[in-house]
Amino acid sequence: MSNWKEVANLEEIPKLGSRVLETDQGRIALFRTSDDEVFALRDACPHKQGPLSQGIVAGHTVTCPLHNWKIDLESGEALAPDEGCTNVYPVKVESGVVFLQL
Amino acid sequence: MKERLVLVGNGMAGVRTLEELLKLAPEEYEITVFGAEPYPNYNRIMLSPVLAGEKTIDDIILNDRNWYEEHGITLHTGDPVVEIDRVNRKVVSRSGLEVPYDRLLLATGSNPFIIPVPGSDLPGVLGFRDIADVDAMLEASKKYKKAAVIGGGLLGLEAANGLMQNGMEVTVVHLMDILMERQLDRTAAQLLKRSLEERGMKFLMEAQTAEVLGEERVTGLRFADGSELEADLVVMAVGIRPNIELAQKAGLYCERGVVVNDTMQTYDPRIYAVGECVQHRGQTYGLVAPLFEQAKVAANHLARIGIARYEGSVTSTKLKVTGIDLFSAGEFNEQPGDETLVLQDPARGVYKKLVVRDDRIKGAVLYGDTIDGTWYFQLLREGTDISDFRNTILFGQHDLGDAGHGDETRVAALSDDAEICGCNGVTKGQIVDAIQTQGLFTLDEVRAHTKASASCGSCTGLVEAILASTVGEGYEAQPSKKPMCGCTDYSHDEVIKAIKEQELKSLRAVMDFLEWKTPDGCASCRPALNYYLLAYWPEEYHDDPQSRFINERAHGNIQKDGTYSVVPRMFGGLCTPDQLRAIADVADKYQVPEMKVTGGQRIDLFGVKKEDLPAMWKDLTDAGFVSGHAYGKALRTVKTCAGKKWCRFGTQDSTGLGVKLEELTWGSWMPHKFKLAVSGCPRNCAEATIKDFGVVCVDSGYELHVGGNGGIKVRVTDLLCKVETEEEVLEYCGAFIQLYREEAHYLERTAPWVERVGLSYIKERILEDEEGRRALYDRFKVSQKYAQVDPWKERAEGGQAHEFRPLKLTA
């Protein structure tokens, strides 16, 4: 089922940064990495629900601002030795526009 | 096609090298491993607890067979390599396997030294080296009663302790007149001997073994003086010899060990060697910490990065006998001309000795209370000048200030349920368990797995001590040169130096010049680099918001529910009714759920939604407030008391001076948070002597105090000097701050910084060098020109809007 929704222009998300997207299903964090890939994760760390959107992005990971868990942006999984996972949403970028599949 | 790497020796040093290599270059080689023992890689230094029945063999396996499989490594156990054919570049194993190599890594370890006396080959005579030895000892303990251990060193005593735990009567036979003479001085050795005797161990000192007695199996020992000892098990633990047989046969240059250079290469550059079989700069090592350092270097070269060098190790030792705390490092026996500092308390069973030369620690022996071992060892390796605190050094680091763990210094005596890390609720038992089951060797690994000491860090000393007492000599002390983070091998000091000397003025320039290993750095190094660049190039560098921790990016403190707190600056703690009304209005308007008067004499508004921040700041800015930077590694507050204007004891205008200091310093970014206080008299109501920079007014002028801390680790300030005028206070304060800003490591408070560089150094720069002080003060003022731009006002006017405005998905 393809249910792509236009959510932002790429330029609205700072490089190595993020934006919060408010949806019916709660807050989703959109991350833009230095290689201009965009990832979308539920904006809650698997540890104590910290807002991942507020973390520091490096490579394809984000560090949660509350207790420094590192989360893999591709899989939503915490990097070892921590364990846990947050939801990942499919994203695509076409001619500078970010689409999200909900 | 991948190159082929063959590892000869499936022990800790060799496999550690593979682990390091796989981290750096996972696809570089097709790897084959040969091991003589029938086991995968296990933790050899945990053999003592296995013998003592505290661990099983499964507990001490470091890499199980799955690990080899997962990494595509071919493992041949129980099949030692018997020949290296250097011409055709292949190895031949005992079972006849022939495997070609492009690079070869030798990690053949060492053999126990068996004293060449008659009878030493009798059944019942063992070394203490591998799982087979432990099995044989455990087997013997079931059938026999009397054991003799030859050798009163580390290994011998651990073996003796283990055999005793298994119900044997054990006599330790030692050639010298003191135990562990390579690690202990006479006094500590006697304390140790007494304590072991109390547990039932027997000793024969100055006894030279002449013959092992017995026909079909050992029955006893005869000594040089003709006396005899009955024994049905003899363990020889008199030392180890590098196992160089294979290397010698292959024509590699060997002396006591296989000789290697600083890149761990033998005389044949295709062949590397690490571990106990190695001789480097004339030294051989039998402890695990140096082996791991070697492994890092060898892996670095095998991965063709080629920048690491091994420069030898200083080692420290702990005895792994449960319940006995013992630590030694460096030159623990004084030379003529050395000074020794000694603390001895026989009733508590405590003995501490430091050997000091030119105000630097050269060696340490600790018995009974070893918690400061890691601290002394650090001072030793870093060559720290201890003159500023040598009068209290023997009382330990906590005497310099501590979070209240003061008495809990006997780590070995702590119960398993003792809470070590109060932030994360981690007990000693959990830490010990993680160290043993996960095979952890470093503080960082323990932090990652247990979170102990990973938050505020105040229990770091305790965690290190537990690590040291659990893995014994395997403890890998923090290297004296500590890389900034996993993204680089360079230390904070080296990075700072490069930024300054190479005039690196952007994050990219720093990462490129210093060959950062990760494309974007990480959450640890990026904020540090951003700070250093800001501190060194205030006129040119543009702050990178994405390298700021969220608090500094959003200019508020993130709270556990994702809301923010807002603290407007109140200079010197002074305020007017209008200001208070404005704050009250803002609190009403934005429905602030809670307000609190802070310890820094201002007002905290909690529970603000991020989206509301810019509008709220606009209202506050309109009322004349600027950001309080309560969220930043920055100048926080200037606490003041009433002072001479109102107080009958006041000697100077402490409130007015506090306002002037805050006006001078607000907005400046620092390595860590920075707090000031001004007290109007020595009653010190503003608590100036636990601040980073504190002023205590006296009738004749102003006392300036530095390096205090009221937080994690309470530390009282050191008196820097006394000055006579307010202008001088401002100048000295600005100069001190600038020195801290330029030279401290990121996230280092003034308290540990002052301890690290020494008060004498600070005095030299601020008091004795008048010109230097002025220059520091001038540089501070230049930087303030760029720093004193209110971030709240900027954002209230629309700056960084994307940070605060969420995107909305419209249906």
Image (cartoon, rainbow, N blue to C red):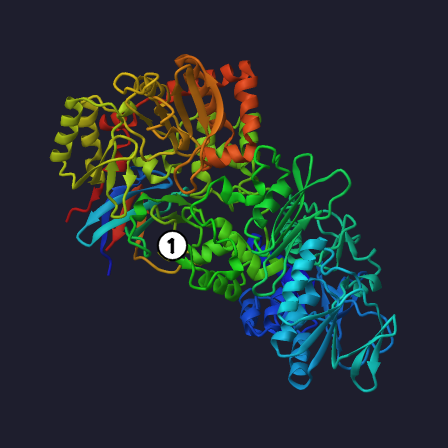
Whether residue B540 can be seen here: no
Q: Which residue appears at 69% of the width and 59% of the height?
A: B190
Q: Which residue appears at 50% of the width and 39% of the height?
A: B400
Residue farthest along the front direction in this orientation: B347
Whether residue B224 can be seen here: yes
Count how many numbered circles sit on residues in the image.
1
x%, y% of residue B410?
52, 56
Q: Dividing the picture into quarters, in which one does residue B649 lie?
A: top left
Chain under numbered label 1: B
Instruction: Tell me which amino acid carries mark 1.
Output: Asn
Tell me if residue B727 comes above or below residue B329 in the rendering.
Answer: above
Q: Quadrant of the N terminus of chain B?
A: bottom right
Q: Name the residue under label 1.
A: B424
Q: Dividing the picture into quarters, in which one does residue B655 lie?
A: top left
Tell me if residue B25 comes above or below residue B78 in the rendering.
Answer: above
x%, y% of residue A45?
32, 53
SS at circle 1: loop
| Image side of residue B737 versus residue B23, left or right | left
x%, y% of residue B748?
47, 37
